[in-house]
Image: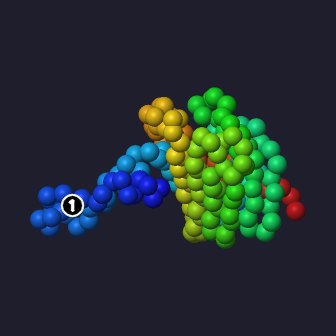
Amino acid sequence: MTASLRRRVPHRLSAAAAQGRIDRVLPLYVHVYALAMIVGEATTTVLVPPSEVFDFVLDLNRYRQADHKIGRVGAMHRTGDTGTVRFSGRIRGLPGPAGTYPFKLSPSRLQFGSPVAGAARWFLDFEGTFDCQETENGTVVTHREVFEFKRPWRWLAEPVLRRWLETDTGAEMVRFKDLLDAESNSSNAAPA
């Protein structure tokens, strides 16, 4: 959120908040900011450890079988737990601009950030995360994508893409689970 937006929209208490009927009122700029973001989130459980989840996702040529929003994949550069990957997006089947996206990896999380190079940086801010938690039944993977389109694209993209992204992220995680579990089953069935 920009500092200029924060300055322009003052924090106001509603009458209900002033009378103590609600605990917390978010400033108006928070509500405006949240409306500008498009969020998709879904959770699934897979039969592989987090390291294999992250290896699968970082191999974008394989991962795009699950995530149909990934178009042409370019170069990936990795140094330890950080790096960048270049790819173009696809929104509702239409090609999008290419961008170079940074990523950070930890033992339980993979996070992609906004494009740092390429035409995509002029269109959107982005955050994509994969949070993993190991359980008795496998690895619980929560995938979240947050798109914030820049002006003037925001006014066109937001109403058209909000529901689509929510639905697409759920379908993506179904394909994700099917692909990872099939790979896990085939590697477990292979003779040693």
Furthest-right residue in view?
A: 192
Which color scheme did the rendering employ for the protein? Answer: rainbow
- Residue at x 23% of width, y 67% of height: 23
Q: Describe residue 192's horizontal placement relative to residue 133 as left or right.
A: right
Work out which residue is located at the far left of the displayed protein and give it.
19
Number of disc labels: 1
User: Hey, what amino acid is under mark 1?
Assistant: Leu
- Where residue 169 appears, x then y in whole percent? 55, 44
* Residue that lies at the very extreme toward the top in this rendered image: 94
Measured as percent of width and height from the top left, residue 17 is found at 18, 62
Direction from residue 65 to residue 42 in the image, left or right: left
Toward which corner of the image does residue 108 lie, by quadrant?
bottom right
**Residue ID at (78%, 69%):** 80
Q: Is residue 46 visible?
A: no
Secondary structure beneath disc 1? loop
Q: Residue at x 58, y 62 (%)?
A: 131
Q: Position of residue 71 (x, y in %)?
A: 71, 37
Q: Is residue 84 visible?
A: yes
Between 85 and 1, the residue placed more toward the observer is 1
Residue 123, by quadrant, is top right
Disc 1: CA contacts within 10 A as few (<14), some (14-19) or many (>=20): some
Q: Position of residue 185 (x, y in %)?
A: 73, 54
Q: Nearer the viewer, residue 56 or 81?
A: 81
Front-lying residue, 138 or 132: 132
Along the horizontal axis of the image, is 172 left or right of 167?
A: right
Residue highlighted by disc 1:
13
Residue 178, relative to residue 91: is it above or below? below
The quarter of the picture where the C terminus appears is: bottom right
Left or right placement of residue 4 versus residue 168 in this view: left
Please tell me which residue is depicted at 18% across the width and 57% down the height of the picture: 14
